[in-house]
Amino acid sequence: MSPPKSQTRDPLKPFRFNLEFRPRFSDLDPLGRVSNSRFFTYFEEARMAYLASLGLFAPSVPGPRLLVVQDTCRYAMPVQHHHLVQVHLRTADWTTRSFKFHYLLWLPEEDIVAAHGTTRVTCVNPGTRRTCGLPSEYMEIMRAYEKGRD
């Protein structure tokens, strides 16, 4: 017998932000499952939506840019075309030059985790192509948004 949900760890608790969608036909592999490479696309779409929602994604504005330096994904179960997908996202592990996005790919209709992932990004000066410090307003905005989520 399983313990009541209120007594089990809630995998969604650390996350405040999520992006919800259904997979597109073009996301599927020949076996009818979402291709493993698409999970990174889903993470990327959530990342851009998160930054935009906080007012931190402005590609036409001059200044430092975030650059992906590492992506990881741990697959837990296949996702199929009929699944409703939620990518839950949070930021953490900040340093003066980088931070991580943490993802949980959740299937709400199944009440199950399909994957976990991370993306480490660093800040780069587009003129010099060298790493630089993260703008303090980025860290302040993200930390304020994420406060109390651990």
Image (spheres, grey):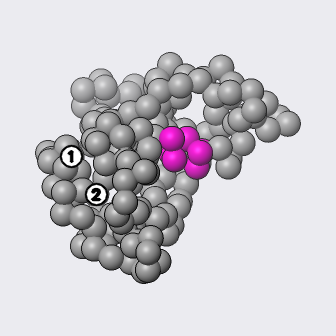
**Vertically, is 128 above or below 149?**
below
| Few, some or many residues within 10 Å of mark 1 (<14, 14–19, 20+) | some
Report the residue at 44% width, 44% height from top. 48
Seen in the image, is 107 located left or right of residue 12? right
Please, which residue is most extreme toward the right here?
Answer: 30
- Residue 39 visible in image: yes
Q: Which mark is residue 66?
A: none
SS at mark 2 in the image? strand
Q: Position of residue 110 (x, y in %)?
A: 52, 23
What secondary structure is marked by label 1?
Answer: helix
The residue that appears at 68% across and 27% down in the rendered structure is 24
Image: magenta residue range: 39-45
- Are discs 2 and 1 less than 8 Å apart at CB? yes
Between marks 2 and 1, how big is the CA–CA gap? 8 Å
* Residue 36 covered by magenta stretch: no
Q: Nearer the viewer, residue 146 or 97?
A: 97
Where is residue 104 drawn, in percent x and y? Answer: 44, 42
User: At label 1, which amino acid type do we have?
Assistant: Glu
Label 2: few (<14), some (14–19) or many (≥20) C-alpha neighbours in 10 Å = some
Residue at screen point 31% across, 52% down: 91
* Relative height, residue 119 to residue 109 (above, below): below
Q: Nearer the viewer, residue 123 or 128?
A: 128
82 left or right, relative to 129: right
Which amino acid type is marked by label 2? Ala
Question: What residue would you read off at disc 2?
Answer: 92
Numbered tag placed on residue 146 in the rendering:
1
